[in-house]
Amino acid sequence: MNQLNYHHLRHFREVAHEGNLGRAAKRLNVSQSALSSQIKTLEARLGHPLFERVGRGLVLTEVGHMTLDHADRIFDVGDELLATLAQTNVSYPALRVGALSTLSRNFQMMFLRPAIAHGEVDIVLKSGNTPVLLDGLRSLSLDVVLTTEAPQGEQGSEFAARRIAEQSVGIHGRPEMLGHSSLADLLANEPLILPTDSAIRSGFEGLIASLGVTPRIAAVVDDMAMVRLLARDGAGLAIAPPIVLADEIRTGLLQTAPFELDIVEPFYAVSVRRKYPHPLLAELLKVGLG
């Protein structure tokens, strides 16, 4: 099978963004006939038309849109490679961050705030489970992964896991649900919302065993954003770090029960050892929750 001609692909990309063959030819300093011939050659290689002529302009077909999406990513990655190797302050590659799907959105925003404030770097955020995200680090398609559990066993030697923050887990809910004289009474009588996070679940199981109570579980949720919404609506009391519900606690919509659970959730930034790490990564790893 013949290889894809990336010179033709780059010229197609220019025409697609211009929407006009003449303007694209002028920008590329080639003749319209030569450019048109290259587009036809690319269409023959792909086996599909890429443009439809509408009036005096060109409109992408469905395959054209798909091809442009791939072309943009291909050439953007090339630009990122040059910027990364140059390590200059003029151009920064996109920062590609993976986050465990159960991780607090508030924490993710706090981690990313320095990059957002920088203003000269695009941020690509991908959520998923731990195996998928770690594979992204291995393939270098991710710069860092945010998680609540450091890689264990043989995986631990592949990655560099930095514990960047931790928060005590508490009980948070609408004020009218918190009027209990003891922690055992609260846990035994109010519906609870639990995240699937392993550190929180294991700590909670130990807590209820020590207190000898059988709690009423209203929901077990794999998304901290949903834990927050359920607590806001009064569906139950959320067992979570306060950062998950920071806005609601600040406004008084939700309150934190005055009981210590002795459960701590850690936050890790996991990366792989690279000769050319993202130039902003070291700054982001200084994040703290206060």
Image (spheres, rainbow, N blue to C red):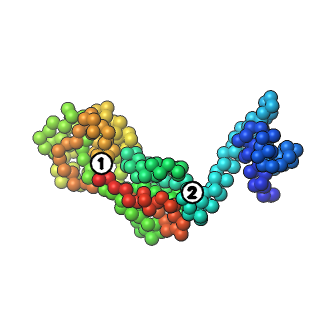
Q: What element carries label 2?
A: loop
Q: Are marks 2 and 1 in contact (CB under 8 Å)?
A: no
User: Is 290 on the left-hand or right-hand side of 183?
Assistant: right
| Percent coordinates x, y for residue 4 in the rendering | 77, 55
Q: Distance between the residues labelled 2 and 1?
A: 39 Å
Q: Tell me what residue is drawn at x 76 percent, y 46 percent.
A: 27
Label 2 vs label 1, nearer the camera: 2
Q: Given the image, on which type of amino acid does mark 2 rest?
A: Val
Q: Tell me what residue is drawn at x 17 percent, y 47 percent.
A: 259
Q: In which quarter of the image is residue 235?
A: top left
Q: Is residue 273 visible?
A: yes
User: Is 113 on the left-hand or right-hand side of 125?
Assistant: left
Q: Given the image, on which type of amino acid does mark 1 rest?
A: Pro
| Percent coordinates x, y for residue 289 in the rendering | 32, 53
Q: Which of 7 and 144 is in front in this view?
A: 7
Q: Which of 23 and 1 is in front in this view?
A: 23
Q: Name the residue under label 1.
A: 241
| Percent coordinates x, y for residue 75 in the rendering | 67, 53
Mark 2 vs mark 1: which is more N-terminal? Answer: 2
Q: Tell me what residue is drawn at x 65 percent, y 57 percent.
A: 78
Q: Nearer the viewer, residue 270 or 16?
A: 16
Q: Can residue 205 be seen in this view?
A: no
Q: Name the residue under label 2.
A: 90
Furthest-front residue in this view: 90
Q: Tell me what residue is drawn at x 27 percent, y 55 percent.
A: 264
| Percent coordinates x, y for residue 239 in the rendering | 28, 45
Q: How crowded is mark 1: few (under 14 residues within 10 Å), some or many (20 or more)?
A: many
In the depicted structure, whether residue 109 falls above or below residue 143: above
Q: Is mark 1 on a helix, strand or loop?
A: loop
